[in-house]
Amino acid sequence: MPPVPPAPSVPPDPTVVHPMPEAPRVVLLRPLITSPLIDVGEFTYYDDPDDPTAFETRNVLYHYGPEKLVIGKFCALGEGTRFIMNGANHRMDGPSTFPFPIMGGSWSEHFDLITGLPGRGDTVVGNDVWFGYRALVMPGVRIGHGAIVASGAVVVDDVPDYGIVGGNPATLIRRRYSDEDVARLLDVAWWDWPAEHIGAHVRTIMSGTVDALEAAAP
């Protein structure tokens, strides 16, 4: 009797809101997002015991547009991770930063003073980024692939690929890999592999060497 071939691996469903039914505090963000100004990649998750499904309104703040928030695939967002968007900006070129026109009445005649304020552009997070507890990201920041943002960090400047940052304001603590290995990792771009291929090489992706990851590439 011929041997029975192994059953094909079945990757997890990226459209399921709660990938761990026994842990409702963990949600995949992509199926929850409704704003055209927010783009989140597959399998990026948020962990929060207090209504994680409200991430779009509770964790993305002052998002009045037109700037976008772009978060890549396979990112891990710890409880309280928040993104401040350009809508929080106030004028700073006069004696007062107070936004008088929003109070209404005759003051609203001066609404042009608070529209069209300069912004820093889109906020962009790469793939495979880990945000610690209550990390805060300021407008227009770009965070590279494979980066780690420490708990409580306030990110005001760009973070390099595979960089680790922490503090307020966040500064670079170290790089996870050498420049040469970072280039190799970016070339491999495992997050773009087919889900079935990722599943076959989870151990290499999580604990292997750069050499092993290159050897596993499809």
Image: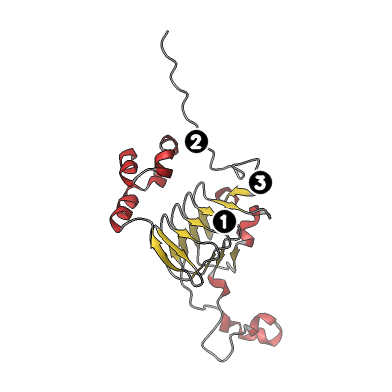
Q: Residues within 10 Å of mark 3 (few under 14, many from 20)?
A: some
Marks 2 and 3: which is nearer the front?
A: 3
How far is mark 1 from mark 2, CA to CA?
A: 24 Å
Give the residue drawn at x 33%, y 46%. Answer: 210
Q: Which residue is mark 1?
A: 78
**By what rule are the colours in the image chosen?**
secondary structure
Q: Which kind of residue does numbered mark 2 sit on?
A: Pro
Q: Earlier in the sequence, mark 2 or mark 3?
A: 2
Marks 1 and 2: which is nearer the front?
A: 1
The answer to whether residue 88 is seen in the rendering is yes
Q: Nearer the viewer, residue 121 or 51?
A: 51
The quadrant of the picture occupied by the C terminus is top left
How far is mark 2 from mark 3, CA to CA?
A: 20 Å
Give the residue drawn at x 47%, y 30%. Answer: 9
State the SS at label 3: loop
The answer to whether residue 218 is seen in the rendering is no
- Answer left or right for 18 relative to 138: right
The quadrant of the picture occupied by the N terminus is top left
Q: Which kind of residue does numbered mark 1 sit on?
A: Gly
Q: Nearer the viewer, residue 187 or 214?
A: 214
Q: Nearer the viewer, residue 93 or 81?
A: 81
Q: Would you identify the image quadrant in which residue 18 lies?
A: top right
CB within 8 Å, label 3 to label 1 = no
Q: Which residue is mark 3?
A: 24
